[in-house]
Amino acid sequence: MKIPRFLFPFLPLLGIMMSSCQQAGMVNAEMLRETINSSRMAITPHQPAWVSEKKDIHPLSAADLQKVQRILREGDTRYVAEKYYRDEESGNRSDTSSELFYLYGDNAQCLGGRVINGQVYMDDLDIETQQRTELYHILKPYLQQLPQDND
């Protein structure tokens, strides 16, 4: 398989995608900080790496990366029960959102996110309503490029 040049900066990220999102229990606070402070981030579908294609990876612009990092740094680490890492579809906030995505950092770690009523909720962070709405507006162009579930 030929790898497009565009993906070279994300190869370490893509190589570990599948295993890095198989977390058990609460997210490690150090990993969370490393991911938030990544020099590059990309939005991807909520799916294993081996089914992701180039068109499924949407790197954030430098300006958007700074805005996203500012918002995420303001959040508090949130406890997520282990069962939700095994079955994130069930909604770890008592939600039924099917608009799920990953935010990958260049440290090859991912943060799960979901869109609920025009706000982005990060699975492992608690952020205020205003920041969730702002995060949605920043990420909306990237999220709109993700494949839509046809269930």
Image: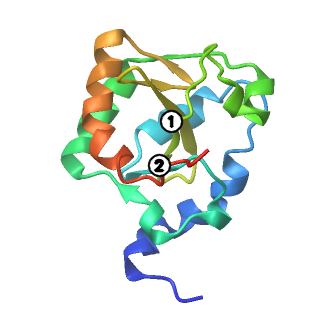
Q: Residue furthest bottom?
A: 2
Of labels 2 and 1, earlier in sequence is 1
Q: How many marks?
A: 2
At mark 1, the secondary structure is loop
96 over 21 or under it: above or below: above
> With 134 as the anchor, is 78 left or right in this view?
right
Gap between marks 2 and 1 measured at Cα:
20 Å
Q: Position of residue 102 (x, y in %)?
A: 52, 43
Q: Residue at x 55, y 47 (%)?
A: 149
Q: Is residue 65 visible?
A: no
Q: Position of residue 107 (x, y in %)?
A: 52, 52
> With 114 as the anchor, is 50 left or right in this view?
right
112 over 149 or under it: above or below: above
Between 93 and 123, the one nearer to me in the picture: 93
Q: Residue at x 54, y 60 (%)?
A: 13
Q: Quadrant of residue 16?
A: bottom right
Between 75 and 47, the one nearer to me in the picture: 47
Between 8 and 132, the one nearer to me in the picture: 132
At mark 2, the secondary structure is strand
Q: Which residue is mark 1?
A: 99
Q: Quadrant of residue 73?
A: top left
141 over 123 or under it: above or below: below
Q: What's the amino acid at mark 2? A: Gly
- Pick the quarter of the image with the N terminus: bottom right
Q: Which residue is mark 2?
A: 105
Between 53 and 10, the one nearer to me in the picture: 53
Q: What's the amino acid at mark 1? A: Glu
- Pick the quarter of the image with the C terminus: top right
Q: Position of residue 19 (x, y in %)?
A: 73, 53
